[in-house]
Image (tube, rainbow, N blue to C red):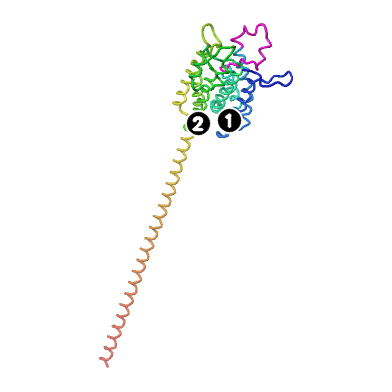
């Protein structure tokens, strides 16, 4: 494959740089969308992304150079020619995480919330970036035959042709990792869609577990691995990252969320106070009603007493009037007899 995309005079524009640029841009777009969904200021994501991309690329390069010092002993300037390849993703991940950690402390934002936002962007960027390896004819597996590659039905013909390097066919391990990363990207999106009650950091752990598991097995096929004595560095780092993320996932899962618990307690307390207030108002209204009823009864009783008194008075007057009449009658009768 021709690693050069096109030339303008003596300046070469390479496929490797092009795919890294596309990966960064798409990563930014996706991260901004995720930030909006999580009500996080886009300027914060721009700032974080700016520093993370810069230090992530530097970390990936330094990591690669440290394990290939012999390649640069006679040509120190080659270290700065990033377009020729030589970025180790594990170095980029480690440097990127450290950058986000420092950034989160400075901005006083929860780190795991930020890493959850960028996790889908990162794995998508890794998938896209692997195509730069294809055009650079690097990151391939062991020697094989065209028949073996054709029997693997998921490998397109143009990739099979591109894997013929210096007359020999190789396994396209870059393509295997591309597919693995794309599956991981889909998995992360499904988790975000279906698992709404996840805690901060769980998505990051799934990303690290998924990528580490795939990278461990794919790395076993690579022929250009970074080595530490007789061990492949990528496999060692993959095991470490997998174990750390696996343990962290379950720590986060079973750990009590103090903030959420506090919010729940506050809500519960408010509800209790509301109930007490409502009961107090209800009791007050009930007491008022009882007072009104008692006053009403007392009034009725008083009215009945007054009525009874009036009736007695009226009856007494009638009796007195009758007595007076009878007395007058007797007096008259006596007068008549005397006459």
Residue 202 counted in the magenta span: no
Relative side of 13 to 97, left or right: right
- Measured as percent of width and height from the top left, residue 20 is found at 62, 22
Residue 261 seen in the figure: no
- Kindly indicate whether the residue at mark 1 contacts the one at mark 2 (C-beta within 8 angstroms): no
Tell me, for residue 112, which label it has, or none: none
Q: Nearer the viewer, residue 79 or 110?
A: 79
- Measured as percent of width and height from the top left, residue 48 is found at 61, 26
Give the alpha-carbon distance from disc 2 to disc 1, as whole Å. 13 Å
- Measured as percent of width and height from the top left, residue 322 is found at 30, 80
Q: Nearer the viewer, residue 82 or 104?
A: 82
Relative side of 149 to 135, left or right: left
Magenta stretch, residue numbers = 65-90
* Quadrant for the N terminus in the image: top right
Q: Residue drawn at (34%, 73%), measured in percent from left and top?
A: 313
Residue 15 seen in the figure: yes
Report helix, strand or loop for mark 1.
helix
Residue that protrudes farthest toward the left in the picture: 337
- Measured as percent of width and height from the top left, residue 4 is found at 66, 19
Residue 70 counted in the magenta span: yes
Q: Main secondary structure of the magenta part?
A: helix
* Quadrant for the C terminus in the image: bottom left
Q: Quadrant of residue 325?
A: bottom left
Tell me, for residue 192, which label it has, or none: 2
Q: Nearer the viewer, residue 103 or 260?
A: 103
Report helix, strand or loop for mark 2.
helix
Q: Is residue 210 above or below residue 229?
A: below
Tell me, for residue 30, which label it has, or none: 1
């Amino acid at each position: 494959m021709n690693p050069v995309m096109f030339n303008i005079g003596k300046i070469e524009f390479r496929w490797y740089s092009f795919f890294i640029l596309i990966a960064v841009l798409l990563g930014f777009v996706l991260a901004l969308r995720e930030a909006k969904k999580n009500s996080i200021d886009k300027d914060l994501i721009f700032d974080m992304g700016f520093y993370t991309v810069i230090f992530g690329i530097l970390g990936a390069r330094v990591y690669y150079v440290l394990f290939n010092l012999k390649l640069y002993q006679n040509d120190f300037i080659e270290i700065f020619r990033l377009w020729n390849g030589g970025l180790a993703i594990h170095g980029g991940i480690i440097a990127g995480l450290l950058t986000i950690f420092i950034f989160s402390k400075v901005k006083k934002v929860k780190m795991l919330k930020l890493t959850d936002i960028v996790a889908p962007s990162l794995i998508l960027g890794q998938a896209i970036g692997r195509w730069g390896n294809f055009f650079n004819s690097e990151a391939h597996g062991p020697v094989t035959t065209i028949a073996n590659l054709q029997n693997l039905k998921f490998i397109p013909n143009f990739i099979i042709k591109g894997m013929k390097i210096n007359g020999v066919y190789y396994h396209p391990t870059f393509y295997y990792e591309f597919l693995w990363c794309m599956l991981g990207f889909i998995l992360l999106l499904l988790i975000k869609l279906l698992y709404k009650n996840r805690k901060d950091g769980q998505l990051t752990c799934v990303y690290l577990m998924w990528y580490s598991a795939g990278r461990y097995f794919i790395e076993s096929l690579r022929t250009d691995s970074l080595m530490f004595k007789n061990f492949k560095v990528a496999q060692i780092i993959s095991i470490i990252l997998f174990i750390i993320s696996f343990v962290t996932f379950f720590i986060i899962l079973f750990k009590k969320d103090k903030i959420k618990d506090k919010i729940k307690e506050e809500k519960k307390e408010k509800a209790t106070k509301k109930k007490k207030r409502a009961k107090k108002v209800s009791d007050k209204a009930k007491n008022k009603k009882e007072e009104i009823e008692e006053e009403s009864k007392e009034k009725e009783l008083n009215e009945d007493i007054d009525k009874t008194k009036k009736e007695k008075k009226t009856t007494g007057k009638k009796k007195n009037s009758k007595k007076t009449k009878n007395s007058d009658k007797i007096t008259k009768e006596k007068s008549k007899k005397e006459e």
